[in-house]
Image (tube, rainbow, N blue to C red):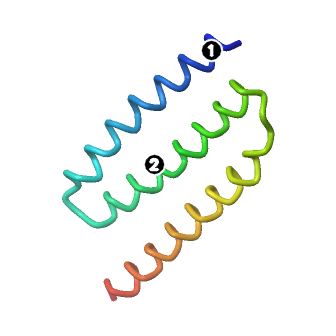
């Protein structure tokens, strides 16, 4: 099981590096918002992989809080972006 967790962590790291490039090179604000939302989802997935790897369930509330903050941040930016387009 530890090998699977290490492979999953490596894949998440590779995806995060690609996503950081997309955030930095994104031509529009919405591209950057989607990239940052993806990064928060990857951080939550990384915490979940760590919880499996270490068999420690104390990070589960942090995962839930990170997912909630990511969703609310994306919803807020999208709302204000739509309002500015009108």
- Residue receiving disc 2: 39
Q: Residue at x 44, y 74 (%)?
A: 77
Residue 30 image-quadrant placement: bottom left
Residue occupying the point 48% across, 31% down: 12
Instruction: Give the quadrant of residue 48.
Output: top right
Picture residue at 32% right of the left edge, 36% below the top: 18
Residue 46 location (% of width, % of height): 57, 37
Q: Secondary structure at mark 1?
A: helix
Choose between 1 and 76: the one closer to the eye.
1
Q: Quadrant of the N terminus?
A: top right
Crowdedness of circle 1 by 10 Å Cα count: few (<14), some, many (20+)? few
Place of residue 66 in the rendered image (x, y in percent of width and height, measured from the top left)? 62, 57
Depth check: give the residue in front, 16 or 35: 16
Q: CA distance from mark 2 to mark 1?
A: 21 Å
Q: First in sequence: mark 2 or mark 1? A: 1
Going by the image, does 39 lie left or right of 18? right
Q: What quarter of the picture does the C terminus occupy?
A: bottom left
Image coordinates for residue 22, horizontal then vertical, percent: 27, 47
Q: Would you place residue 39 above or below residue 14 in this image?
A: below
Q: Which mark is residue 25?
A: none
Q: 16 or 76, which lies in front?
A: 16
Dot label at residue 4? 1
Q: Position of residue 85 (x, y in %)?
A: 31, 83
Q: Residues within 10 Å of mark 2 (few under 14, many from 20)?
A: many
């Amino acid at each position: 099981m530890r090998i699977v967790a290490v492979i999953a962590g490596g894949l998440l790291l590779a995806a995060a590096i690609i996503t950081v490039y997309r955030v930095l090179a994104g031509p529009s604000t919405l591209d950057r918002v989607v990239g940052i939302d993806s990064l928060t989802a990857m951080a939550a997935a990384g915490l979940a992989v760590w919880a499996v790897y270490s068999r420690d369930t104390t990070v589960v509330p942090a995962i839930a809080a990170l997912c909630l903050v990511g969703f609310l941040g994306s919803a807020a930016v999208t709302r204000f972006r739509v309002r500015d387009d009108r």
